[in-house]
Structures are given as structure tokens and as C-alpha cells.
Image: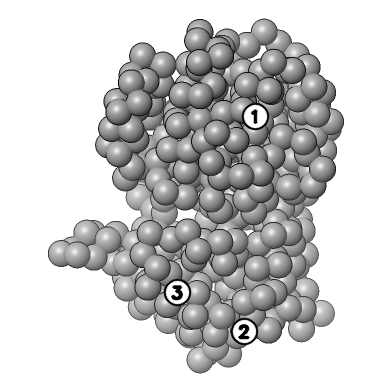
């Protein structure tokens, strides 16, 4: 049996978000298990020092915005020579692990006959359905359906995302559901006094669907005039959302704040989290909310049922402001009921602890290496 000695992680564009946190947690812990971790990424020296252990070897990708090309695209091109060099030098105890832009490493690993596992971080079908650019999204979906077949294994992070992959590719036997290695520790459940704040956390973009929450809050506030809506995040839709707030005359009741390194202060003091995403993989925001005893209303996006349970009573059934507004009113009026449900789901958070999930990652990578 081959021993897994080297993992080469492909993550050309180092960005803020849940996937990056999962990458950091995996790489740091795996590097402490006598496994050599190499990372292909445009991560800055500052972020490398801040987030990664000194055991991880970084092959830094150069990336800058050029003309109409984003940093993610230039990072992709910049990673090619590094990837080919490492493919040529890798031995039989090495496996490639792609966290991002999987088509490129799949293509070259197939040419070089190297083992590769990819981590799928979202519901591929819903991500295409709700994409901003439908033409580009369907091209990406086609490329995934073709190239994913050549992977030696796929790790996905929710049941719905796994089912979407099973529809997308014939590589069904190699798809393994492993939850995110996300939580460092589980915070003791606290039934504490909370401020009259409805919280929304996430990038300000179409996917996160904050416009629905704002419109629903207009209905909610007619019955609960002393509440505030707090949106925490940043993104391309910030101006559009501020314009919506102004048009609905909600300037005094809706607040937008930039992302904070200390999100605990929001999760531990708000009354309710509203999570209206159109699609996800496994939303870390819901995990964080539960870990801080914060009740949640969520759409049935990918991962929501894995975190909150299939029988959770506070899913938004229809993607319209009226339904959400009524549900928010009902939850606040009957708050003890959702708090009891939150306590039940809080007891199941061990599934998202870093150590247990990284061990599952390594076990799966070792199995693939020996096939």
C-alpha cells in the first residue's frame, strides 16, 4: 500500500470566503501529519504568514488585472507553468488536490497520468441556473460534465451538491460526501438576551439574494417597528442594495457594514439570522450562526438541510418577500419554538470540526492514491 507523503493543492486565486477557510484548515492540519503540503496560489506573503504554517511550501502565482481579465483569470494562466513543473517532478506517493478552477489541473493531470482529487464546493446545477451570465455558466457546466469524468475522486460537502454532481457526471462511484473542516471548537449553547436585530451575512451579490431580505424586512417592520436589519458583507451589489433601501425608505432601519474579522459580536447579539441564498455548497454562515446559538431562517439551498436538518420547520418555502416577511414575524412572535429547534441542531455540530473532517479528507485521498 502506498503511503500518502505529498499533497499538491491547486488554488490559484486566494480569495476571501468559505472555500478559503476550508483550504487553510485542511492544509495546516494535514501539514502536521508528516505529509508534505505544497500550495499553488497567488496568496500574498503577508497572508501566507498570517494564515499558513511555515511547513507549507507555497509556489506563488503572479496575478494582476489586465485589460478585461480579472485576477482570477490571470492567476489561472500564471499557474500553468508551475503546475506542469510539479507534475513532471511528482512521484507515486503524490496526489494532486484541486480546490478551484478544476478543469485546468484535470486536463494536465490526465496528460501526465497523475492522480487528482477535486473538491466541489457548490451545487453545480443551481449555480448555473442562477448565474449572472447564462452563456458563460452553461459553458462552464458543459466543461465540468466532461472533465470531471477524468478525476480520480471528488469530494463534495452536502447531499444536494452530491446529487447535482451525480446528474452531471458519470463518475458517480468516486463522489464522496465530506463536510467542511470548519469549526475549531463548539461554543456552549447560550439562551441569552439578544438585541432586536435581524442579521444577514454574506457577499453582496445575486447569489446571496439580500434584496429579498430587504423587501421582506419592509413587511416585517410594520409589525416590529423597533427592529433593525444588519447586512454584513461586501461585494458588487452594494450600490444596488443601498439604492433599494433608499427606494423603500428604510435608511433608518437597514444598515450595511463591511466584513469583520470578529463576526462573533454579530452572531452572539442578533435575534435572528436570515439566509436567503439561491445556491451554496455548505454555507459556513449557518454553521457559525448555530455555533453561537443564533436561530436561522434559510432557503433550502445546498447544505442548508445538512446543517439544520431535513425536517427543520423554518425553511423559506417560496422565494418571495411576502412569504419571508410573514415567516420572520411568526418566528419573532413565537421565538421560544425556534430557540428549541436551534438547541437541537447545535448538539450535532461535531460533524463540522476541523480534526474529524481533515482525517476523512486524508483517508479518502489515500484510498484514491492506492486505486
Colouring method of the image: one colour
Where is residue 36? Give x, y as percent. Answer: 60, 63
In percent of the image, x 71 and y 11: which residue is there?
192
Label 3 belongs to which residue?
A: 138
Q: Which mark is residue 149?
A: 2
- Work out how far the residue at label 2 is from the one at label 1, CA to CA, in angstroms: 42 Å
Crowding around mark 3 (Cα neighbors within 10 Å: few <14, some 14 to 19, many 20+) is: some
Where is residue 112? Give x, y as percent. Answer: 52, 90
Label 1 belongs to which residue?
A: 327
Where is residue 110? Give x, y as percent. Answer: 54, 88
Where is residue 324? Give x, y as percent. Answer: 58, 33
In percent of the image, x 84 and y 31: which residue is there?
344
In percent of the image, x 60 and y 65: which residue is there?
119
- Work out how far the residue at label 3 is from the one at label 2, CA to CA, in angstroms: 17 Å
Q: Secondary structure at mark 3?
A: helix
Q: Secondary structure at mark 1?
A: helix
Q: Secondary structure at mark 2?
A: helix
- Work out how far the residue at label 1 is from the one at label 3, CA to CA, in angstroms: 34 Å
Residue 180 seen in the current view: no
Give 215 or 40, whichever is nearer the viewer. Answer: 215
Compared with 163, 317 (above or below) is above
Amino acid at each position: 500500500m502506498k503511503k500518502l507523503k505529498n499533497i499538491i493543492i491547486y488554488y490559484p486565486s486566494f480569495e476571501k470566503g468559505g472555500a478559503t477557510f476550508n483550504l487553510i484548515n485542511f492544509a495546516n492540519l494535514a501539514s502536521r501529519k508528516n505529509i508534505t503540503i505544497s500550495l499553488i496560489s497567488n496568496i500574498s506573503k503577508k497572508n501566507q504568514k498570517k494564515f499558513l504554517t511555515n511547513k507549507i511550501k507555497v509556489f506563488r502565482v503572479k496575478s494582476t488585472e489586465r485589460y478585461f481579465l480579472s485576477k482570477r483569470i490571470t492567476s489561472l494562466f500564471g499557474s500553468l507553468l508551475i503546475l506542469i513543473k510539479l507534475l513532471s517532478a511528482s512521484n507515486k506517493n503524490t496526489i494532486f488536490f484541486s480546490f478551484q478552477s478544476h478543469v485546468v489541473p484535470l486536463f494536465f493531470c490526465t496528460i501526465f497520468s497523475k492522480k487528482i482529487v477535486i473538491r466541489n464546493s457548490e451545487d453545480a446545477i443551481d449555480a448555473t441556473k442562477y448565474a449572472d451570465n447564462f452563456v458563460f455558466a452553461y459553458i462552464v457546466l458543459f466543461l465540468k460534465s466532461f472533465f470531471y469524468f477524468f478525476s480520480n475522486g471528488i469530494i463534495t460537502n452536502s447531499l444536494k451538491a452530491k446529487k447535482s454532481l451525480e446528474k452531471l457526471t458519470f463518475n458517480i462511484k468516486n463522489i464522496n460526501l465530506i463536510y467542511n473542516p470548519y469549526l475549531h471548537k463548539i461554543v456552549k449553547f447560550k439562551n441569552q438576551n439578544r438585541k432586536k436585530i435581524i442579521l444577514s451575512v454574506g457577499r453582496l451579490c445575486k447569489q446571496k439574494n439580500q434584496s429579498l431580505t430587504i423587501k421582506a424586512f419592509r413587511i416585517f417592520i410594520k409589525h416590529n417597528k423597533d427592529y433593525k436589519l444588519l447586512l454584513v458583507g461586501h461585494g458588487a451589489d452594494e450600490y444596488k442594495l443601498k439604492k433599494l433601501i433608499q427606494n423603500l425608505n428604510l435608511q433608518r432601519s437597514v444598515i450595511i457594514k463591511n466584513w469583520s474579522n470578529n463576526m462573533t459580536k454579530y452572531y452572539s447579539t442578533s435575534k435572528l439570522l436570515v439566509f436567503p441564498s439561491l445556491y451554496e455548497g455548505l454555507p459556513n454562515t449557518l454553521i457559525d450562526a448555530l455555533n453561537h446559538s443564533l436561530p436561522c431562517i434559510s432557503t433550502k439551498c445546498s447544505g442548508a438541510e445538512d446543517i439544520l436538518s431535513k425536517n427543520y420547520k423554518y425553511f423559506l418555502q417560496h422565494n418571495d418577500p411576502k412569504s419571508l416577511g410573514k415567516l420572520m414575524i411568526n418566528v419573532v412572535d413565537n421565538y421560544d419554538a425556534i430557540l428549541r429547534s436551534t438547541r437541537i441542531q447545535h448538539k450535532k455540530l461535531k460533524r463540522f470540526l476541523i480534526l474529524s473532517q481533515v482525517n476523512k479528507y486524508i483517508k479518502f485521498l489515500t484510498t484514491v492514491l492506492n486505486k
